[in-house]
Image: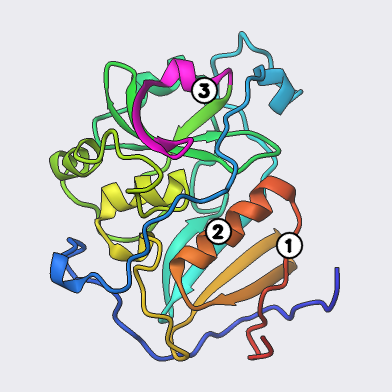
Amino acid sequence: MGNQLDRITHLNYSELPTGDPSGIEKDELRVGVAYFFSDEEEELEDRSQSDSYKDQSPAKEGPVAPKEIEYSAFCCQECIFSKLRENEDLNIYSIKTLLAMCRPGDLLELVTSDQPPHWAVYERNDQVIHLYRGEIRKDSLFEISNGRLGRIVNSRYRYRPLPADLVMQNASSHLGLGSGEICWTNSESFAAWCRFGKREFKAGGEVHASEQRYFLKVHLSESNVHTLMFHSLEDLIRERRKVDASGILKELSLVNGKE
C-alpha cells in the first residue's frame, strides 16, 4: 500500500475558525460555494440483508454488530467526528426497530458492506429527506433501505446541533432541488449540514488555506492507526467514505507535511 504512516499521539496546530460559533450559517459568511453534484455512488442498489451481512437473519429484530473501520477526526486539537466502538454504540438495527427509536430531526445512517453509508434526515411517519441520485427528495425509509440495516448517528459529529425544528426546516426547504442547484457532494454532507448548519459541509464552503488542517485517524486496529491530513472537511468526508466503500486507505497526505 506504500509507505506506512506513523501513529500520531499529539497534534499541535493553530486554530482557524471556519464557521459561525453558533453553528447557524449566515448568508454573508458564505465563501466560494461551488454548486455541483458529486459523482459519488449513491445508488442504494437493491439487495437483501444477508447480501450485506451474511451472519444475520432477515427475521432478526435485535441489534447487529458489523465489522467496520473505525475513525476519529480532529480540527484545531478538537475532536469533531468519532466512530469508535469503545465510545459509542455502533450496532445497526432493522428498519422496523429503528423507526421506533427515531425522532424528527434525527440523522440516520443506512449501512452496507461495499458502498458508502447513506445518510438521511428523519421527518416522521417513516419519511426521510435525503440527497439521492442528484436530488433532494422525501422518501419512505422502508423503500430506500432495500433491506439494509441502519442506526441513529446524531452524535457522530461533535458540533452543537440545531433545534429539531430548524433541522427539519433546513431539510424541507431544499426539497426538489436538482443536480444543478445543490451544493453538497454526498448524502452525509447534506444530512449533517441540516443538523448542524455549518458551511464546512458544503462543497467549496471553506477557504483552502495552508495553515488550515483537518486530521483523520483511521483505526485499523488498536495498535495500527493511520493519520491523513486535509485542508477542508469536505475532502476529509469524501476520502473517509471512499475507505468505507472499498476498505482501501489512500495516502493523500502525511501528517509530517509530505503531500
Crowding at label 2, few (<14), some or many (≥20) Cα neighbours within 10 Å?
some
Crowding at label 1, few (<14), some or many (≥20) Cα neighbours within 10 Å?
some
Taking the spot 52% from the left edge, 25% from the top edge, the residue there is 93
| Amino acid found under the numbered disc labelled 2 | Arg
Residue 141: x and y in percent read 42, 21
| Measured Cα–Cα span from mark 2 to mark 1 | 12 Å
Residue 73: x and y in percent read 50, 67
Q: Earlier in the sequence, mark 2 or mark 1?
A: 2
Q: Quadrant of residue 199?
A: bottom left
Labels 2 and 1 touching (C-beta < 8 A) = no
Q: Earlier in the sequence, mark 2 or mark 3?
A: 3
Name the secondary structure under disc 1: loop
On screen, residue 20 versus residue 250, left or right, reads left
Taking the spot 61% from the left edge, 8% from the top edge, the residue there is 59
Is the N terminus in the top left, top right, bottom left or bottom right quadrant?
A: bottom right
- Residue receiving disc 2: 238
Taking the spot 39% from the left edge, 36% from the top edge, the residue there is 135
Q: Quadrant of residue 42?
A: top right
| Amino acid found under the numbered disc labelled 1 | Leu
Say which of 147 and 179 sits in front.
179
- Residue receiving disc 3: 145
- Residue receiving disc 1: 249
Name the secondary structure under disc 2: helix
| Measured Cα–Cα span from mark 3 to mark 1 | 27 Å
Q: Earlier in the sequence, mark 3 or mark 1?
A: 3
| Measured Cα–Cα span from mark 2 to mark 3 | 22 Å
Labels 3 and 1 touching (C-beta < 8 A) = no
Above or below: residue 132 compared with residue 76 = above
Say which of 230 and 133 sits in front.
133
Query: Which is more foreground, mark 2 or mark 1?
Result: 2
* Stretch of the chain drawn in magenta: 131-147
